[in-house]
Amino acid sequence: YGGQVAAQGFWAASRTVDPAFHPHSLHAYFILGGDSDEPVRYEVDRIRNGRSFATRRVVARQSGGAILNLAASFHVREEAPDATRITMPEGLPEPESLTSEPAWSGLLDHRDVPDTDDWARSWLKVAGPLGADPVVHLVAHVYASDDIPTEAVQLAHPRGRPRVETEYETMYMGASLDHAVWFHRFAPADEWTL
């Protein structure tokens, strides 16, 4: 799962940065499919340690070569206005009223919002408590962020909603080619996110 490799690579980068620097963004390219039966080695290069920003490059490797190339940026926290322009859509059901989707990973609780037409809307959270370390929560968001976007891609193909067992559904396999995540502010990953 690409989200796992990206999350672990981001975690490795975060361990090399002064705690005064907070995650800012990551950009990753998935180079080869990983082998789940083989360990992954994460090589972290300290590209820059500035006064305001720190930059890291991470290469995830297995015996077949590099499987991920990730750039991570960290920033000293500064006071800034909240520039959020997107508001929560009205009329959506609360996550507690929806059924958990059968999960490929026991780490995520994923609940699809019905009747959203061309939108792939789901409530999502990590299945258990994560503790107080904000970086752990952001790493969990990186892990989860590779899950829902593939559903948006599937909506553009002939499977439809609600999910039905069709020949397409049983043979579909998606994979991310690249990944980008920006961290605007802290959000607990063990609480519901739409």
Image (cartoon, helix red, strand yellow):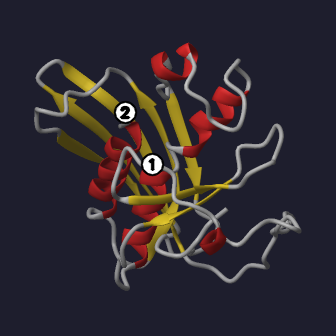
Assign the C terminus to one quadrant of the image: bottom right
Q: Position of residue 16 (x, y in %)?
A: 27, 62
Closer-to-camera residue (95/86): 95
Q: CA distance from mark 2 to mark 1?
A: 31 Å
**Which mark, by number, is residue 102?**
1
For disc 2, the marked residue is: 69
Residue at image coords 36%, 80%: 133
Residue 170 relative to residue 119: left or right: left
Residue at image coords 85%, 68%: 87
Q: Quadrant of residue 31?
A: top left
Q: Nearer the viewer, mark 2 or mark 1?
A: 1
Disc 2, SS: strand
Q: Is residue 6 above or below residue 190?
A: above
Q: Position of residue 130 (x, y in %)?
A: 35, 77
Q: Position of residue 50 (x, y in %)?
A: 45, 63
Assign the N terminus to one quadrant of the image: top left
